[in-house]
Amino acid sequence: MRDKLRIIVGGLVGQYPLGGVAWDYFHYLLALSELGHDVYYHEDTWTWPHHPVSNYPVDDPSYTLDFFKTFFARHAPQLANKWCYVLLHDKHFGMSREAFSDVAKSADVYLNVSGACFLPDDLNPNARRVFLDSDPGYNQVVLATKPEWSQHVDRWEDQVRRGHDVHLTYAENIGQPDCLVPTCDIDWVTTRPVVSLPAWETSRRTDPPPTAPFTTVMTWNYFKGPVVWDGVEYFQKTVEFDKVRQLPSKTKASIELAVGSDRYDDDTFRDGGWRYVRGLPVSVTPDGYRDYITCRPRTYRQPPSRKVSSSYRSLPTASSMLALVLLG
């Protein structure tokens, strides 16, 4: 492995410019940059950006562009001029079409986090093209069934299968007899999420208040249609929450939910004794999201169902992930 690689990270932060989404994808960008690699961000999802305040797709990317500029100015000024957002596979923002094309032609790795992006047309044919499955179970079922409600699903399925050299997944148990996730005849290599710590250092050194609750930031429902595999429909938190509805009554700990949707009844949480807040105010910016979850003693995410994927465990270094990409 060369000491310094030219790496393009693909994501969908521009499509969903929210605090949690930004950290989900930009952790890879920041960590690889911290290792000394020549790193760029690219986004081309062929999709209108979602405006989190109006809660609706828009044809004006101004909010998304400001979101990018603010994040990089605060957390990665070395990357402030190394991002390219493409609106509907046409208009380029940040880096110009020509400047990004020069980068793509000489790239060593394209890391397609969540498989969200369509690969650049002029990507170096010798570049390692990596599909990183960050939504195990959901992605495999969509690949296997190609539901009509999934936008650009035929094009996406073809690129996932034939457009990538390496397929990484967080599903550590995939392919085992007790795992019901379809492999889709893909040779999956298991990995774990990467986290970059410098932007969180102050929060790590600050003790939370003694009365701070356990928290989670979650979206109540986000599937655009039914997810069905082998005759079984897999639901979202709207159904799974019933299993833990009475949890607050069984512990002395304070538990708080930040819920990122308005499609629920307040009684859903009130009847179970939950503390809850609206998700948007605490997660609309990367700093707000970070400050909300780190002022509490611990933070939990909704666990995946045992039926569809194995658990997410400890976090690797970015260099170990690169070893999987280049040597695995």
Image: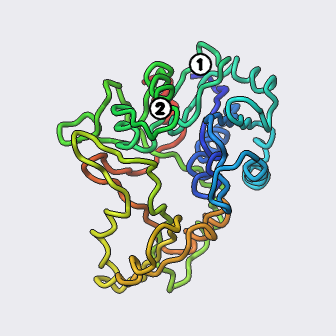
Looking at the rendered image, the disc whose residue lies closer to the viewer, 2 or 1, is: 2
Residue 172 appears at what percent x and percent y? Answer: 33, 41
Is residue 4 in view from this perspective? Answer: no
Q: Which mark is residue 127?
A: 1
> Do the residues bearing badges 2 and 1 touch, measured as CB atoms within 8 Å?
no
Relative depth, front residue between 167 and 198: 167
The answer to whether 110 appears left or right of 92 in the picture is: left
Toward the top, the furthest residue is: 125
Relative depth, front residue between 221 and 120: 221
Question: Which scheme is used to colour this image of the protein?
Answer: rainbow
Is residue 311 in view from this perspective? Answer: yes
Q: Write down the quadrant of residue 138 in the picture.
A: top left
The answer to whether 325 appears left or right of 197 in the picture is: left
Residue 328 appears at what percent x and percent y? Answer: 42, 24
- Reading the image, the residue beneath label 2 is 153
- Amino acid on which the number 1 mark rests in the picture: Ala
- Amino acid on which the number 2 mark rests in the picture: Val
Residue 40 appears at what percent x and percent y? Answer: 70, 34
Residue 118 appears at what percent x and percent y? Answer: 59, 29
Q: Earlier in the sequence, mark 2 or mark 1?
A: 1
Q: Secondary structure at mark 1?
A: loop
Q: Give the residue at x 61% y 69%.
A: 282
Relative depth, front residue between 209 and 16: 16
Toward the left, the furthest residue is: 177
- Mark 1 is surrounded, within 10 Å at the Cα level, by few (under 14), some (14 to 19) or many (20 or more) other residues, namely some
Q: Give the residue at x 79% y 37%.
A: 93
